[in-house]
Amino acid sequence: MDKEINPNLLLKDAGFELDPPGFYQMILTLGRTSLEAVVFDPSRKKFIAFIQYNIPGNSGKKEYFEQVGRIMAADELLRLPYKNIRVIWQSQTSTLVPAPLFDIGARESYLQFNQGLDAGDVVISDNIRNADAYNIFAVPAELYTAVGSLHPRIHHHASVLIETLLLLNRHNINPMQVFVNVHTGFFDMVVINERKLRFYNSFAYNSVEDFIYFVLYVFEQLKLMPEKDMVTLSGQILKNSPIYDIMYKYIRYLTFAGPIGQVTESYILQDIEAYQYQTLFNSILCEL
């Protein structure tokens, strides 16, 4: 590996073998300030490797993808010939369309109308079966250049988030469930009512005041009750952080997302706060 490119965190199961990677699955998440990947062994139903690289938050688009490309070229673990590879792209550029209204030939028009597109963007759609909807999103051409040699399936983080929340909560007796998933500079908000998707959106924020404004706005619009309805947190948020503190000021019941069984069975992840990587770990549950 390039001496100048080293992971910020690397965990590997003692039983991880380089020779049979064709039996393993790799899932890689690209966010604004990080690259994370896990390797999953289907035969043992556990994660056997976790790797994380931090990427400077002030990187421009060109510099960001150049850094991703250098990481992909230098890291042996990421370049192994796995059975299948998924890349989860984290961005706000996506739009949900109900399945009965979806026309694959109109994907660019849907997205252009709601979000806008940059030159060279490739438009993809995920079929979120449990929501009976399609998530249409844009992938920068530079992403294909950076990870194209892996020949991955590329999905949007919101597709994975919504699909897995619906799967994990299909037997939840609580009729109203609210989820907030935090990224650098934006967050997702999902509301499930009677086991069906009622609301999804993402909101950009520059301050904690922005953050709580959007949360409370959704509560008001959907007639949710801050003193009654619990919010489940995930992503880049810590207890006693400014975001957590201001949410706790206005929302009576806060909790952090619990780990799925595949995480609890993976000893290499015992010291990791799994809720911070919920989309990455939970993606093993869904087939988009």
Image: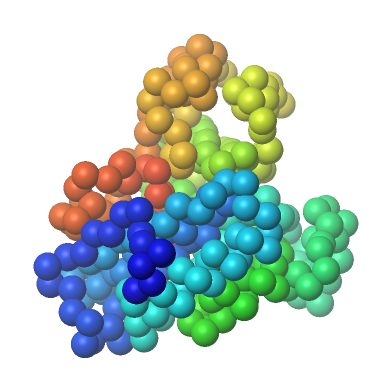
Residue occupying image coordinates x 84% and y 57%: 116
Locate residue 281, reporting x and y percent.
37, 56
Residue occupying image coordinates x 86% and y 66%: 109
Using the image as rendered, state which of residue 107 and residue 144 is in the foreground: 144
Residue 37 higher or lower than 232, as above or below: below
Residue 21 higher or lower than 113, as above or below: below
Locate residue 260, reporting x and y percent.
30, 51
Residue occupying image coordinates x 23% and y 86%: 20
Please tell me how many numbered marks the rendered image carries. 0
Residue 145 visible to the viewer: yes
249 displayed left or right of 210: left
Identify the image quadrant of residue 191: top right
74 displayed left or right of 96: left
Q: Residue furthest front?
A: 3
Identify the image quadrant of residue 131: bottom right
Residue 253 higher or lower than 149, as above or below: above
